[in-house]
Image: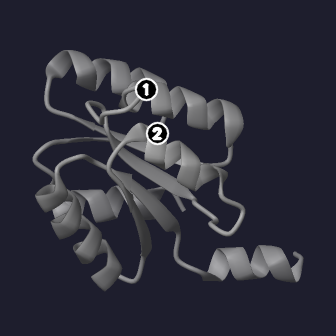
Amino acid sequence: MTSVESTARERAPQLLFVDADIVARSVIANYLRECGYAVVEATSTDEAKALLARSDLDIDIVFADVDAPGEVDGFGLARWTAEHFPRVRVILSATLQRETKIAADLCGEGPLLRKPYDQAALLDQIRRLR
């Protein structure tokens, strides 16, 4: 194992949290920070794409609302992320049953959370992705 691989395994995952709802985003982002995770916040999928493309950020997990605003929705962001950053895992959240099914299909074996967010369930899903 190289020192870079060792360092990557030792650090907590860096999350990109995409949700237009500032209250929900702030509560969950602060909770995850208290749990030791580095969290970057985005209000839209356009902002999320720009953050993922930054070389100074090393995003491991994208957590996005399927209804996130932008040129594409959360589903489109998941597809774009898989195409451009295949090592980055994606967690999608949805409120509607139809969206839940589509998100589960997009994430493959990956997790899916329903809104409103359950903080403990989110933390459990993030830990499973490591």
* Residue 121 on image: x %, y %: 23, 57
- Vertical side of 10 occupied by 68: above or below: above
Q: Nearer the viewer, residue 76 or 3?
A: 76
Quarter placement of the C terminus: bottom right
Res. 71 mark: 1
- How far apart, in angstroms, are the residues tagged by discs 2 and 1? 6 Å
For badge 1, the amino acid type reads Glu
Q: In the image, is 39 to the left or to the right of 81?
A: left
Q: Quadrant of the N terminus?
A: bottom right
Residue at the spot of label 2: 46
Q: Is residue 72 above or below residue 15?
A: above
Mark sitting on residue 13: none
Q: Return the x and y of residue 56 as percentages of the image width and height.
A: 68, 69
Q: Secondary structure at mark 1?
A: loop
Going from N to C along the chain, the mark reached first, 2 or 1, is: 2
Q: Please give the count of numbered marks on the rendered protein.
A: 2
Q: Is residue 113 left or right of residue 73?
A: left
Residue at horizontal 30 percent and vertical 32 percent from the top: 66
Q: Are marks 2 and 1 in contact (CB under 8 Å)?
A: yes
- Quadrant assignment, res 100: top left
